[in-house]
Image (cartoon, rainbow, N blue to C red):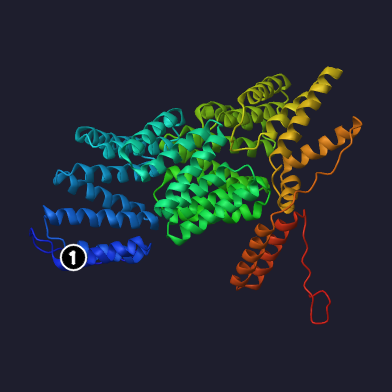
Amino acid sequence: MSKKASTQRKPSGKQVPPELLTLQAAADRARDRYENESAVELYTRALALVPQGASGPPAIVEYELHMGRAACYERLGELDAHIADARAAEQLARQEGDGARQVAALVVVADRLGWRGQFDEAQRAVQAAQDIAARSGARELVAKAAVARARLANNATDFQHLGELAHTALRLCREAGDQAGEGESLIQVAAAEQSAGETAQGRQHVREALAIYRRTGDRPNEGVALNMLGIASADHAEARAYFEQALEVFQATGYRPRVLTVQNNLSLLYWRLGLYGKAQAYTDAAVAQVRKQNAPAVLSSFVETQARPLLGGRHYAEARKLLEEGVALSQSIGSSVNEGWNRLGLGMVYLAEGQAEAARQEFESAVRLLEVGTTPGDKITAMAWLGAADLAAGDWKAANEHTAQAADKLAAAGPQNPEYPFQGVWWWRYQVLLKGRSKAKQVQDAAWAYLNRAYETMMDSIATLSDEGLRRNFLNKVAINRQILLAWTNDAAARGMAVAEPQALEGNLQDQLRRMMEISVRMNEQREPEALLEFVMDEAVELNGAERSLLVLLDAEALPAG
């Protein structure tokens, strides 16, 4: 927590004390240099000099001090202090009849309320901003309020309306010549496009936003764009590079909440690759910090991420506890999408534990809740896993119905950007047909077609992954990928097909050298022998994709120690 100076204030007066202006200038400079804790201290000292019951110029200075300190509190992740300053600023702007400043403060209030999951109150703040902007007739204020409305829709996972709201905000920002707003609107347009599976268009709009941020020197939002490019990237190595660039930006600007967001995304990346230990390290660090904040909307999503590597590593009781917490948090804020993801994970836990009926209930709930999720692919995934639970429960008819629906919907859906890889949908359809009563050639050929589709989907997802270590991890550490690979290889051989080794892609030498340099730097940062050895083994496994690893320590005579 940042240090807070005394808030005892001087008696009322209309003049702005010179020492106050000096402190304000120093605080603004510290804020602009991202020296956030120093800036908070300076803003607090300046606020103590504001005359009591200030109006006129002193009140405007007080407003600016609250807004400046609020920006620093946001970067530091002190959300209660952040929103308190924004509310104080909004009251001052209303007192002074300053519509432009009131809109700016209301936008900040709405953003923080949305982050907390207080969507109704956030919506009221946005509506108030839009009403003031409309009455003023100022295009820049109308545009600012429209951007806030789109951002709230994204925070509330209201993907049904996000696209229209984001395009409206983009048009208004361009008409007003608001470059910052244009960049933010492009980010929201991209989020809507990615949720609809329009990944190519989404990436292009993020790149346009990134160009704006770099041109205007907006480092924090440059990090936002880099993070989104990582999410949208089909190449896992490229995604990792984007995430690490974003992480570097947020660490340099002291933007702690966004550091946590990137850590969460890095965890999901390593989970997809089967590097569960590394995924767990990232998500544990992120969740530990989010728990200190009053942000149930974020926590409900982050605990679901935290459960994934636990599930992959077969730590079912721990995963179930987190997912149950995620369900409760999601229900407390009315987030159907977050509840759906957590229930999807719970179904996987129950299925892995052999509790087929409990799994069916969770998957049925997930199918219903993910109806209007981030992408149609999430509902398709839940439906396929419902079929898997039906099969485990001995209800082949229901399994056949649900996996057929999932496969048909996926075939018709076009490109998607789902939370869970799609090879699982084809795999479960194959499993159901394989275990059916009919052994007719037509059915067997259909089963093979689904298995082949699972294999192709899996391999397509790493077609551009030039890091051979990551490719091997992906294929042998993720259980369903390993099962698909073994089944496809056996069936292909039985059908007389030549099974060729995948051709290695030419790696990016510059990227490889950068990775080796980063590993060397992090090795030198280790101070504990046990932590160093664990780090060495983790990095070695990531680099070469080994299924198992063994480290032998030698003594002075080159013999195994101990």
- Tell me the residue at 84%/77% (across/down): 559
Q: Extreme bottom residue here?
A: 556
Task: Residue at 13%, 61% (x, y): give it.
Answer: 16
Taking the image as shown, residue 195 lies to the left or right of residue 451, namely left
Q: Is residue 215 above or below residue 459?
A: below
Q: What count of labels does the image hold?
A: 1
* Vertical comparison of 112 with 542: above or below: above
Circle 1: residue type: Leu
Q: How far from the left and from the top, in percent, is residue 453?
A: 74, 30
Instruction: Indicate the quadrant containing the C terminus: top left, top right, bottom left or bottom right.
Output: bottom right
Front residue of this view, candidates 276 and 493: 493
Q: Residues within 10 Å of mark 1 (few under 14, many from 20)?
A: many
Side of 266 where 24 appears, left or right? left
SS class of the residue under badge 1?
helix
Q: Which residue is mark 1?
A: 20
Compared with residue 42, is residue 356 higher up or lower down, i.e. above or below? above
Q: Is residue 292 visible?
A: no
In the image, 239 versus 3, the foreground residue is 239
Residue 55 drawn at (x, y percent) = 11, 52
Which percent across, then down, holds residue 305? 56, 45
Closest to the observer, 270 or 35:
35
Q: Please indicate, yes or no, whether residue 29 appears anywhere in the rendered image.
A: yes
What percent of the width, then of the height, locates residue 449?
A: 78, 26
Rendered view: 450 above or below 246: above
Task: Indicate the quadrant containing the N terminus: top left, top right, bottom left or bottom right.
Answer: bottom left
- Name the residue: 54% across, 45% down: 229
